[in-house]
Amino acid sequence: MRGTNENAADLCLFESLILIFPNCENTSAPQDLRELHRESPISAEKVVKLVNNLVPSLQEGDPFFVPTFLSTYRTFVTTLHVLGLLFMRYPYFHPHSVEHRQVKSSLCTFLHTWMDK
């Protein structure tokens, strides 16, 4: 079981992501995917913003956002919630769109990194 100090450190890292990336796209999610762990100090809207910034952070070459997110998200949300939010954010890709190919490639990179953790 994780100690209180580790949870506090995770909270600080997670909140740092929010402070560093205040302009994350603000999209809402259905209520069932916005629910967090009962004792979560992070709002559902902040989690949505963070998840929505995963792919753009990779596209911009940010070396810190994804590793920090992956090391802290379990304190606040479940893996299923993160996957659900990702699939809501990227529900489909146009087969002939260069931009969609780039997003799909970044999303696959994120998922591969996540699976290796």
Image (spheres, rainbow, N blue to C red):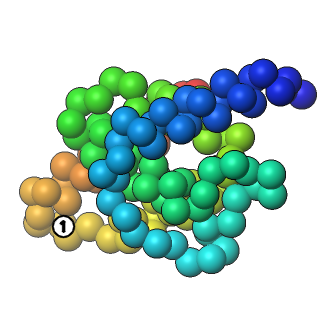
Q: Quadrant of the N terminus?
A: top right
Relative height, residue 64 to residue 110 (above, below): above
Q: Residue at x 61, y 67 (%)?
A: 34
- In percent of width and height, residue 3 lies at 85, 24
Instruction: Let me know if residue 4 appears in the view.
Output: yes
- In percent of width and height, residue 64 lies at 39, 25
Q: Residue at x 62, y 77 (%)?
A: 31
Residue found farthest to the right: 1
Q: Residue at x 66, y 74 (%)?
A: 32
Foreground of the two, 68 or 24 = 24
Could you tell whether 83 is left or right of 20 in the image? right
Residue type at numbered disc 1? Pro
Could you tell whether 106 is left or right of 45 in the image? left
Could you tell whether 61 is left or right of 92 in the image? left
Task: Give the mark count.
Answer: 1
Q: Quadrant of residue 59?
A: top left
Q: Residue at x 29, y 29 (%)?
A: 62
Label 1, residues with CA under 10 Å away: few <14, some 14-19, many ≥20 = few
Foreground of the two, 65 or 91 = 65
Foreground of the two, 32 or 92 = 32
Mark 1, secondary structure of its residue = loop
Instruction: Let me know if residue 114 appears in the view.
Output: no
Foreground of the two, 38 or 84 = 38
Q: Quadrant of the C terminus?
A: top right
- In percent of width and height, residue 45 lies at 52, 62
- In percent of width and height, residue 107 lies at 35, 48
Residue that mark 1 sits on: 95
